[in-house]
Image (cartoon, rainbow, N blue to C red):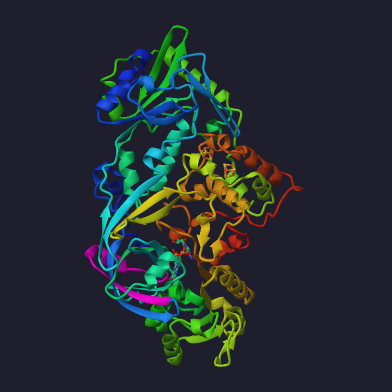
Amino acid sequence: MSVTKSAHKTAHEAQCACHAAEAPDPLAPEPFRVVEVKQEIEGCNTLIVEPETDEAKKLCMYAPGQFHMIYAFGQGEVPISISGDPAHSNRLVFTIMGVGPVSDALTRLKEGDKVGLRGPFGNHWPVEKAAGRDVLLVAGGLGLAPLRPAIYSILAKRDLFSRVMLLYGTRKAESILFQDQLAEWNKHMEMNVSVTVDTADEHWGGHVGLVTELIKETNFSPSRTIAMICGPEVMMRFSAGALLERGMKANQVYVSMERNMKCAVGLCGRCQYGPYFMCKDGPIFSFDQVEHLYKVREV
Amino acid sequence: MKDAMPAVCIDRADFDSVIKALAGDGYNVVGPVLREGAIIYDEISGVSDLPEGWGDEQEAGTYRTVKRNDKALFGHNSGQQAWKKFLYPSRERLWSAQGDNAEFKIEPNAETPPKYAFVGVHACDLRAIEIQDIVFMNPETADPRYGKRREGAFIVAVNCAQSAKTCFCAAMGTGPRAESGFDLSLTEIIEANAHYFVATVGSARGETLMQKIKSRPATDADLQAAATRTENAQKQQVRSLDREGVKELLFSSYSDAHWDKIAERCLSCANCTMVCPTCFCSKTEDTTDLSGNHADRWRLWDSCFTVDFSYIHGGSIRKQVASRYRQWMTHKLASWIDQFGTSGCVGCGRCITWCPVGIDITEEAKVFREEKMDPRLRGDDEVVKGTKQ
Ligand SMILES: Cc1cc2nc3c(=O)[nH]c(=O)nc-3n(C[C@H](O)[C@H](O)[C@H](O)COP(=O)(O)OP(=O)(O)OC[C@H]3O[C@@H](n4cnc5c(N)ncnc54)[C@H](O)[C@@H]3O)c2cc1C
Ligand code: SF4
Ligand code: SF4
């Protein structure tokens, strides 16, 4: 499912000159207000934003894994995945790491500030497909944020799924996102949470090593599992490889990809990946769609 | 609408009235003009602005205007410019914002779109416009700026009576004769003691225009003369591209070593993408005025040959020139088919002419094909499925 503003327009309305004047502009943002800012880890904030108009309200209906383009006044616009609970249809939640001019500007925003939003864009995690099966969520670093809406959706209907496991790897203990929630989810046994860090000091009591090691150690039945992976591309490549080695089929494994993106509606051409537009055909792909491209450098 | 009105002939002496009538109807009339040794597209106010008696010679990496031995008004081939510069300007304001972080308002670009009449659109370029229509007017994500300019545009096609050495529209199935998509189409006929245009009306707008123009019914001989002209143009084409299975060919060539060979010559200058009439990739730019309270968002043409094009935090995806050329050619001839249901190449030959080192997409396509046919030359064949699934 891909929900775009103009999804309900007929071909006639969009193409006929008599409607051209009222045609909505897919490149014009809608106004949102920042109502809460929470620092997650160093340089990374979660923003909760609320729509300012009825038109903006429509942007709050989304499926887990979708993203918006967020505009910071005068700075620019960048793609950011939704990290909130899809059940809340009156607000949107984003977890943003400052890595450059626009993302930095977004992490500097304060309560009461305004942003412009377009979206939601892209396809979504295969939550429905996972019903009745084991679910293995594999996150690397900031990749936990785009997976969180899927976690909320799964836990909201926990009975529909068999075992639910989250394997989460970060560089160091200080970069673990959503720590309180991780503990909460694990405590109630709704989801088995395993966390590993690449490097640790003596205060860390947990697993040290790559997330692929957790994949090797985790107990799940490959034939009845759906895996959803989100993180840096190398991490996804090795994780998908490890899952295939465990006997999963490529069409049971899903990855969420990132590419440079300016428009999110297939007009800027930048997010192409082989035959795909990341913004429309992705960002989530079943691994059998992209396995052959993963083998080629610099696609 | 097509064929509703039988073909007519407009005498060369009356052709000025076509341009004047379009201008009179409020169109911003643009057509070919000779400027600084090249034929480009710009505003015209009458027939005297057209490059009468001028043609061109083209080869890979070479373009030269030459005097013709007749007084043809449309005796030229594709120049370095395409009509996309009007329908999809190289720099355009998307919208503005007024205010600051705490409170701002998005204001749409209020400029009224120009109403263009394009005079002299070759068949390949007509198809290129239709291809950009598919990109920019897809109902779900239509770009209203492009749409408004396109809806208003009046198109006078010109069927080519000659081809450049770089042309291969016949191979791509786009020309040299324009079959549809125009308001009016012309074939220029120059004979010992006659100079006229065989005109076909393609729309109601075209029919209304023709009511203001002095013309006579076309005879069978006129139609035959027109057909001969375009047949000649087709016969002159020395380049071709085998479209059969070219998508599968390129999708199975991602790891071919030949990309590195091309990259030894390619300067990654982006000329090919700038001159290509179908290339549509863009970047955005955000600017603020000195007060900081007024921001504009701009869209600019961009190219898959730049390093920034594929930049994501941590570095560019396509660091090597080979990957960038591969992206361009694979997009044109293969992924475009999956994305938009058509090839992204119309065979205008511009990328061949304007490549400073003369890289030729038709030649490169041949190399990949020959390699695939010769098992001794076959590269990494593992990657065979590129098609969307
Ligand atoms: C589908 C998708 C979802 C994303 N979700 C999140 C998220 O939830 N949280 C988060 O912090 N970041 C996310 N990102 C990455 C985020 O968009 C980039 O960090 C951001 O674009 C960097 O922009 P910048 O101008 O601050 O920095 P710079 O690094 O200076 O980038 C300059 C420009 O390059 C492009 N660019 C750079 N990095 C990326 C990138 N990784 N992806 C796409 N375009 C890029 C952008 O157009 C950017 O404006 C996501 C990216 C994509 C494609
Ligand atoms: S790829 Fe070259 S020949 Fe084909 S349409 Fe573009 S510029 Fe013309
Ligand atoms: S192929 Fe030619 S025109 Fe295109 S980027 Fe390379 S050198 Fe420039």
The residue lying furthest to the front in this view is: B290
| Residue at image location 52% in from the left, 34% down from the top | B348
Q: Quadrant of residue B102?
A: bottom left
Q: Nearer the viewer, residue B240 or A226?
A: B240
| Quadrant into which the N terminus of chain B falls | top left
Residue A129's spot in the image, x, y percent?
Answer: 45, 72
- Judge whether B212 appears above or below A12 on screen: above
The residue lying toward the viewer, choosing from A246 and A81, is: A81
Q: Residue furthest right?
A: B376
The picture places residue A226, in percent across and down from the top left corner, at 51, 75
Q: How many marks?
A: 0
Is residue A30 visible to the viewer in this orientation of the structure? yes
Considering every residue shown, the one lying at the far top of the view is B193
Magenta stretch holds residue A57: yes
State yes or no: residue A235 in magenta. no
Res B120 → quadrant: top left
Q: Where residue A86 sits: x, y (%)? A: 35, 74
Residue B213 versus residue B362 in the image, above or below? above
Q: Is residue B252 visible?
A: no
Residue nearer the viewer, B28 or A14: B28
Q: Position of residue A237 (x, y in %)?
A: 59, 69
- B114 or B130: which is nearer to us? B114
Q: Is residue A277 left or right of residue A117?
A: right
Give the residue at the far left of this rendering. Answer: A54
Magenta region: which residues? A44-66
Determine which quarter of the picture holds residue B367: top right
